[in-house]
Image: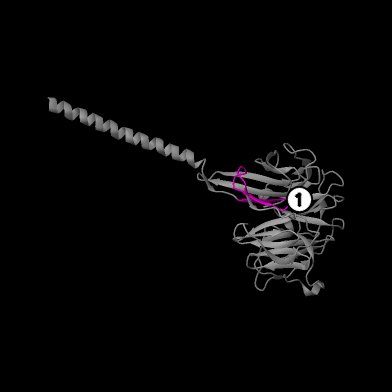
Amino acid sequence: MRSGKRFFLQTVLLSAAIAGFIGSGCKKESDIGGDNGRVVRTPYSLYFSDRLGGLFNTNDGQAYKIIFPRDGVSSRSLLPSGSNLLWAKVNLHLSADNGRNFNPVNFRVEPAAQWQSLMINAHNKVFLASADGILESDDNGLTWKPSVSDPASGIFNPVVVSFARLSGGNLFAVDARGNVFRKSGPAPTPPQSWKQVSVNTSFPTGLYQIANFNDALVAGSASGADGVWFSNNEGADWTQYSGLPNNQEVRSIYSPNGQGLLVGLDSLGIFRLVGTSFVPSNNGLTPFTTVYGISYKQDTYKNEVIKQYVYIATSTGLYRSEDLGQNWALMRSGEYRAIY
């Protein structure tokens, strides 16, 4: 009897241990599932530069690394390409070690281009608005050559100030007088040349930067006198958006992942497109802020959830929005000029 009782007791304890192990396994699986919603699988990398030429990096908007010290020369544009980082100041500079060291590329950037869109990745190349015309690189900025233009147009290589690429792949550029140029893409063999767009209804002559809003081209007046315009037929006809204040310089234009359109102004913060009209979207911004650059980033978590962020480089700090530009939070004080 004692032996039987002992066997029975051992059996009960073993069963309880197995049940406990299985139960703890289920609980552990639940914990892993919870972690998957907190652990970032694919983090972003945000680069931004201040007025005095210091270069910073962050992967979460909270911790920042100074990766290049201030040299007193203000930034104009940042663009990662492949494993390289391109940085436009007065001249173009390139880093092959994540920004720790930069070497001059010895091309003078077009002085009228004071915004992010003076460089662009498109057609498996990098394009640059240089003082000598459009330059292109096939090796992520290591070497450059003049971009092919249309001999029939009489323009060997136009000096442009801004680029934009539509969702279908066609690439566009605008010069300092507001002339629009088009390069078909993705480029076939042989490469398509730049051709000036024949315009039926144009925006007023002047200095503009351009951007894309899905299938629409957008042009913002750098002088502020002529506002922001859009074209739904690749630059042939242009219509003016409403809602922006008069005579305010457009410093930045950006569509965060195709989800809306944001315009940064001189001293009046940021405006957001609602329908065909812009409305102020400055909740959280310091009054009289100038917005120099806009960038979109996202975190992808292990459970496939994606969290979206919009960052802006401004005269009063680096701000972040988690609702596509409706509300802003100050992440770092300072005066920042370029962002990617």
- Quarter-of-image position of residue 92: bottom right
Residue 220 lies, in percent from the top left, at: 80, 52
The tally of labels here is 1
| Above or below, comparing residue 32 to residue 93 in the picture | above
User: What's the coloring here?
Assistant: one colour
Apparent side of residue 160 relative to residue 302 in the rendered image (left or right):
right
**Is residue 170 visible in this depiction of the protein?**
no
Q: Which residues are magenta?
A: 45-65
Residue 165 lies, in percent from the top left, at: 70, 59
- Quarter-of-image position of residue 82: bottom right
SS class, disc 1: strand
**Is residue 14 visible in this depiction of the protein?**
yes
Residue 48 lies, in percent from the top left, at: 68, 50
User: Residue at the spot x=40%, y=37% of the render?
Assistant: 28
The residue lying toward the viewer, choosing from 176 and 92, is 92
- Quarter-of-image position of residue 143: bottom right
The residue lying toward the viewer, choosing from 124 and 287, is 287
Q: Residues within 10 Å of mark 1 (few under 14, many from 20)?
A: many
The residue lying toward the viewer, choosing from 5 and 78, is 78
The residue lying toward the viewer, choosing from 189 and 340, is 340
User: Residue at the spot x=58%, y=46% of the render?
Assistant: 299
Apparent side of residue 29 relative to residue 178 in the rendered image (left or right):
left
What residue type is disc 1 on?
Ser
| Above or below, comparing residue 290 to residue 179 in the picture | above
The residue carrying mark 1 is 252
Q: Is residue 61 magenta?
A: yes
Q: Is residue 142 magenta?
A: no
User: Residue at the spot x=38%, y=36% of the render?
Assistant: 26
Quarter holding the N terminus? top left
| Above or below, comparing residue 250 to residue 131 in the picture | above
Residue 274 lies, in percent from the top left, at: 75, 42
